Image: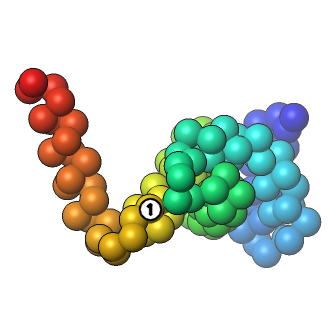
Amino acid sequence: MLTLTEEKALIVAAQAGSIPARDQILHEKLPFIRYYAKKYADRFTTIEDLVQEGAIGMLSAIAQYNPEKGAFAHYCSLWIKQSMRCAVYTTGRFIKVPVWTRKHISRYRTASVKLN
């Protein structure tokens, strides 16, 4: 488990191009990625695929994170979930529906359930 100062130092090193620092952050946050992968897994998308998508989201979070702002765990969770949702939306149907359309359909279904 990394302390906050170690985590920030690794993030700064990873942003500077250090591959070992990036790999260490990914290794430390892998249980975090698996946690969200289990939530988003369905019959069309496997947990392994979602873990890979979560790792891609984590790499995006590392590249764009500003250590002076908030907590890294919250910031990377947003990127991980966004990456996994996009993967589920694009591979979760036999007929491809754009991601923004799937989001609208999901909102309509949620509102319909609340109204009924």
- Image spot of residue 80 (x, y percent): 57, 53
- Image spot of residue 107 (x, y percent): 21, 45
Residue at image x 34%, y 74%?
A: 96
Quarter location, residue 114: top left
Quarter location, residue 1: top right
- Image spot of residue 67 (x, y percent): 63, 50
Residue at image x 71%, y 57%?
A: 48
Q: Is residue 72 left or right of residue 42?
A: right
Q: Residue furthest left?
A: 115
Residue at image x 81%, y 63%?
A: 22
Q: For residue 61, say whether it is visible.
A: no
Q: For residue 80, say whether it is visible.
A: yes
Quarter location, residue 34: top right
Residue at numbered disc 1: 92
- Image spot of residue 50 (x, y percent): 62, 57
Q: Quadrant of the C terminus?
A: top left
Q: Is residue 2 above or below residue 92?
A: above
Dot 1 falls on a residue whose secondary structure is loop
Q: Is residue 111 above or below residue 82?
A: above
